[in-house]
Amino acid sequence: MKSASLTRLCLLGALALTLAACNTFMRDTGEQTITPVDLDPRNPGEVRIGNVVFLAGYKLDFDARFFGGLSGLLIAGDGGSMLAVTDHGDWVEAPLNHDSTGRLTGVGTVTMSPLIGVDGEAIDTILEPQERDAEGLARMPDGRVMVSFERRHRVWVYDDLAQEHEPLELDLPETITRLPGNDGIETITFLPDGRLLMIAEEPASTGTTIDAWILEDDLTWRWVGYIMRDGFSVTDATALPDGRIIVLERWFAAPMSLRIRLRELTPAMLDSGAPLDGVPTVLFKQNLIIDNFEGLDHRIGPKGEIFLYMISDDNFALLQATYLYQFRLDP
């Protein structure tokens, strides 16, 4: 018998238009420096914060044009590579190295290439700057990749990243139009049962309830909502195999006050009928080496460990940096 997720993917495929072959675009490479960093300079090495243990961190410096502004993160299941998107509308890829215990030990050559639009052209050449703002990444069960965008709110589905085919555009809930321009679809992640969870960054109006939806088995969107707490905004999420969802959040106050937090949602919350209201589990304060983390993913280690990975968006600002961090999530 077909699973619900397989049925849904078949339906999505049936809605797709035939994709024509597209042009090949050059990947951008350049001088880069990958520097190991500690989360807590006062306590080098492993550091426990809440229910995670910091294992490794790297600062990524890359002189390619428009490098920075990374959001969304996908880590290959075997840990061999990472994929992110940028506010300028580019893919960022890099091979990753891990030791036999699963600890991140290095980042290889970073490459960049433009996202391709629905007409087969690089979006940085055909779209207004405000329409390039890629924010969320999700890998579908069949390997395709979804990208969410702010400002002109949309989700594109890439069938074949390597050949840079034109994407399909996912039908979104009608209420998506009420989202603020720069506070749109920040988070997309697939649940273990194949459903898609989508969360906005900020409330559409006054209050503390953010728009969030689940794409159900019958391809209809169900509004679920997400409760903001303590002034934190959602920046990404990853769904674990056991059904828990780890949500990455950010709190910022001018000029330079920053906190990063993880909250945990349980599977029961998704179908409770009440807005999602996760439990805070980790708080990264400014005494640590942190930045504007907007990408979160996980993978399973050689002994069943859950490794979390976070990447930061430097906003193309001189005083910020691009960090890739690895943590172990403990029970």
Image (cartoon, grey):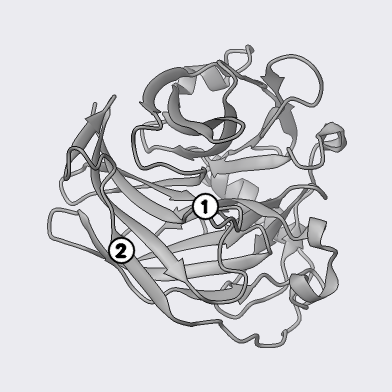
* SS label for mark 1: loop
Look at 81% across and 35% down and name the residue there: 180
Give the crowd class for mark 1: few <14, some 14-19, many >=20 residues within 10 Å: few
Residue 105, picture quadrant? bottom left
Asked whether the beta carbons under mark 2 and mark 1 sit within 8 Å of each other, the answer is: no
Amino acid type for the residue under numbered disc 1 = Leu
Q: Would you say residue 185 is visible in this rendering?
A: yes
Residue farthest toward the left in the current orientation of the protein:
100
Q: Which residue is mark 2?
A: 35
* SS label for mark 2: strand
Residue 119, picture quadrant? bottom right
Say whether residue 246 is left or right of residue 294. Answer: left
Cα gap from disc 2 to disc 1, whole angstroms: 16 Å
Q: Would you say residue 143 is visible in this rendering?
A: no
* Percent x, y of residue 236: 54, 40
Look at 41% across and 70% down and name the residue there: 94
Q: In the picture, which quadrant includes the C terminus? A: top left
Task: Depth check: give the residue in front, 125 or 220.
Answer: 125
Amino acid type for the residue under numbered disc 2 = Thr
Look at 43% across and 81% down and name the residue there: 31
Task: Depth check: give the residue in front, 154 or 28.
Answer: 28
Residue 192, placed above or below residue 208: below
Look at 52% across and 43% down and name the residue there: 292
Give the crowd class for mark 2: few <14, some 14-19, many >=20 residues within 10 Å: few
Q: Which mark is residue 319?
A: 1
Residue 247, placed above or below residue 122: above
